[in-house]
């Protein structure tokens, strides 16, 4: 098994291959005196008692020639074999040592396709993965082991994971792999749970993640064409992959790690560009930095296979319980006539959008479709197995003729809930998996303890406008016409636009903008009084009255850059000037707001600053204190009412 070390060692030959070969030799009628009690020399693996150690009772033996049997099945059969005597003459010993020497030279660790039998081979043994998706960027690092352990105990033998580029390179050439961003620590945690890894490093990942994982600073070059062979885009990708890929190289399976495969791009056939030069560049980059032994693949929906596939990259598909499995797998067969069937995203649920209802997927439909997939001998990854949470500003958005921002919760109606608890869907899925392969011994961990605080009273600390000097400590940016977030290097959050009424408005005068150019939501205030909102794609009329020189503040919120369904760069802010009646508003001050600075415990702004506190009509800050009833367990935050709030 892969070693649980920060830098996994390179193994000289396959331990899995060794035990499989020796077991097959014994089962094939080899000389009984050569069947050594090798269970004393096997590494940790196979069925595990409660996820740890060796089984207390041996499982029934299995034939290593059974189609689809994996290395753990082989090990289980070996452990269940009767122990022969230790006696062995010197001749047979020397012969066995010679055979093992040959095996060491001929059986490196490997994950490849057997096109004759249409299966994967792990160390030369037929293997089928039953995997689940978990995104380390949506789970606090302290909880990775808990979630991975629950996945392993559910019967999975692999975990599929995205690497969000913007999560690790917030500014060009500035990298962060610490804490919740420690990718190597996540790989180590997966290895500790005996889980193989299917890595999806992008560069584009979708995942309903901010801008599909692409850094927003790419848009500081307004003419850049993302996900193409545009020289500016390729230069940024090359620089990023020269940092990321050498980091994961020691964790490749043939190097002693647990990464069996890597996905190139993500559902590229759904993008407008269809740039084969770009895809060939990515494939060449992966192989140049990681070597020719790596197993590379693509994933596309049935409509995207034409532009999403590339010769030399294994083609896989994605679909959900309601889709026509036979038809879609037949489409995969057109591109991979000889190889295993793979559904890289079998949807256990679906995402939620702001303003919509929580999405659910019926348990019976999920388990019925999963059983059909496994009965075909196909490989499957369940998306998601645990969804988690879009912390901070990391949620993305979809474009389906309208702008649809994704909620903070990424529960996904997954088998493991957002809180990390097993659901009835998980137990039903586990039951299906048990029909096709052995489950680890031991029960699933219980739901984590929760604490109940009851109602918490919040205290008004002041209007947002009272804290501009902290939110934007530098002087505001002066500009004749409004600029976008990207133009002022404001990646996420909020940007305040300020100007002054050019004339007296005795009659209500409409404030408007052309071409739905508010990205994404504007809070309009006149002399500090909240007047209403203007939102992307909505034609709600907003009328103003006031005196010349009155201060007009427009707070723009970035609700998440589009991660799927949009064929253009998703710039944020005021993309075109605001118009008051027929007058284009000019002479603006721009305040890029740093909410994190206000929350800095060293500032203690709410405690030290005396504000003119009155009940606000617009954006404001509140705080609360409460006493823990006991240990600091997880809890839930319930926000009654229809208003949109941001909680930090």
Image (spheres, rainbow, N blue to C red):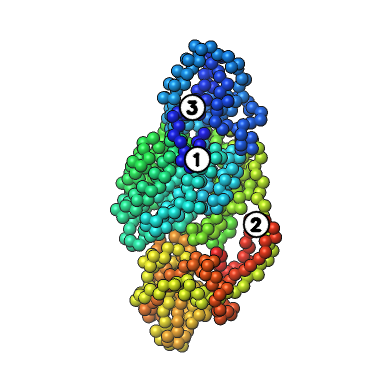
Categorize mark 3 by other alpha carbons within 10 Å: few (<14), some (14-19), many (20+): many
Task: Indicate which label's residue lies in the foreground, 3 or 2.
Answer: 2
Element carrying mark 2: loop
Task: Answer with the quarter of the image where residue 295 lies.
Answer: top left
Task: Indicate which label's residue lies in the foreground, 3 or 1.
Answer: 1
Q: Position of residue 152 (x, y in %)?
A: 58, 40
Residue farthest along the left direction in this orientation? 231
Which of the two residues, 71 or 609, is positioned nearer the viewer here?
Answer: 609
At a point 69% along the width and 63% down the height, the residue shown is 454
Q: Position of residue 1 (x, y in %)?
A: 52, 34
Residue 381 seen in the current view: no
Looking at the rendered structure, which numbered label has been put on residue 17? 3
Task: Answer with the quarter of the image where residue 290 lies.
Answer: top left
Task: Indicate which label's residue lies in the foreground, 1 or 2.
Answer: 1
- Against 325, is 531 above or below? below
Horizontally, is 144 left or right of 184 in the view?
A: right
At a point 47% along the width and 18% down the height, the residue shown is 97
CA–CA distance in space, label 3 to label 1: 22 Å
Which of the two residues, 114 or 493, is positioned nearer the viewer here?
Answer: 493
For mark 1, what is the residue?
Answer: 5
């Amino acid at each position: 098994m892969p070693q649980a070390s920060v830098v996994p060692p390179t193994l000289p030959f396959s331990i899995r291959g060794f035990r499989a070969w020796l077991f097959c030799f014994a089962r094939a009628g080899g000389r009984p005196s050569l069947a050594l009690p090798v269970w004393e020399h096997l590494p940790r693996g196979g069925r595990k008692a409660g996820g740890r150690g060796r089984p207390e009772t041996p499982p029934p033996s299995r034939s290593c020639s059974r189609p689809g049997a994996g290395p753990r099945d082989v090990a289980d059969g070996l452990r269940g074999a009767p122990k022969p005597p230790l006696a062995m003459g010197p001749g047979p010993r020397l012969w066995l040592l010679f055979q093992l020497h040959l095996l060491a030279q001929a059986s490196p660790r490997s994950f490849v396709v057997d096109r004759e039998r249409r299966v994967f081979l792990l160390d030369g043994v037929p293997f089928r993965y039953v995997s689940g998706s978990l995104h380390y960027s949506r789970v606090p690092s302290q909880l990775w082991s808990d979630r991975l352990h629950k996945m392993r105990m559910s019967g999975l033998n692999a975990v599929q994971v995205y690497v969000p580029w913007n999560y690790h390179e917030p500014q060009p050439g500035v990298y962060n792999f610490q804490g919740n961003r420690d990718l190597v620590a996540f790989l180590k945690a997966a290895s500790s749970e005996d889980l193989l890894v299917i890595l999806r490093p992008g560069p584009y990942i979708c995942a309903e993640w901010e801008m599909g994982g692409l850094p927003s600073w790419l848009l500081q070059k307004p003419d850049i064409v993302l996900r193409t062979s545009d020289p500016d885009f390729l230069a940024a990708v090359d620089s990023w992959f020269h940092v990321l890929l050498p980091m994961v190289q020691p964790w490749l399976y043939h190097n002693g790690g647990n990464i069996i495969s890597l996905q190139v791009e993500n559902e590229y056939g759904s993008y407008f560009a269809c740039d084969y030069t770009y895809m060939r560049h990515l494939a060449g980059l992966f192989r140049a930095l990681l070597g020719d032994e790596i197993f590379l693949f693509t994933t596309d929906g049935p409509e995207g296979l034409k532009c999403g596939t590339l010769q030399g990259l294994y083609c896989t598909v994605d679909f959900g319980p309601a889709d026509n499995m036979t038809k879609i797998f037949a489409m995969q067969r057109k591109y991979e006539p000889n190889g295993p069937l793979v559904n890289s995203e079998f949807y256990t649920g679906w995402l939620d959008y702001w303003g919509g209802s929580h999405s659910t997927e019926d348990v019976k439909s999920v388990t019925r479709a999963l059983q059909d997939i496994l009965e075909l001998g196909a490989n499957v990854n369940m998306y998601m197995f645990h969804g988690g949470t879009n912390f901070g500003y990391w949620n993305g958005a979809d474009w389906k003729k309208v702008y649809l921002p994704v909620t903070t919760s990424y529960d996904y109606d997954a088998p493991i809930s957002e809180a990390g608890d097993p659901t009835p869907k998980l137990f039903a899925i586990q039951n299906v998996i048990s029909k096709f392969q052995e489950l680890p011994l031991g029960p699933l961990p219980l739901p984590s303890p929760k604490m109940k605080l009851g109602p918490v009273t919040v205290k008004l600390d002041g209007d947002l406008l009272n804290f501009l000097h902290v939110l934007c400590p530098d002087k505001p940016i002066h500009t004749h016409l409004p600029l976008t977030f990207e133009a002022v290097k404001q990646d996420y959050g909020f940007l305040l636009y300020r100007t002054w009424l050019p004339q007296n408005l005795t009659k209500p005068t409409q404030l408007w903008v052309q071409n739905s150019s508010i990205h994404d939501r504007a809070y309009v205030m006149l002399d500090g009084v909240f007047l209403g909102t203007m939102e992307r794609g909505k034609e709600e009329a907003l009328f103003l009255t006031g005196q010349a020189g009155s201060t007009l503040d427009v707070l723009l919120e970035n609700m998440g850059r589009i991660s799927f369904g949009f064929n253009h760069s998703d710039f944020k802010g005021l993309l075109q000037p605001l118009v008051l009646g027929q007058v284009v508003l000019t002479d603006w001050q721009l305040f890029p707001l740093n909410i994190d600075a206000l929350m800095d415990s060293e500032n203690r702004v709410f405690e030290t600053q005396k504000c003119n506190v009155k009940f606000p009509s617009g954006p404001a800050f509140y705080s609360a204190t409460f006493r823990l009833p006991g240990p600091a367990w997880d809890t839930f935050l319930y926000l009654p009412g229809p208003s949109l709030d941001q909680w930090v």
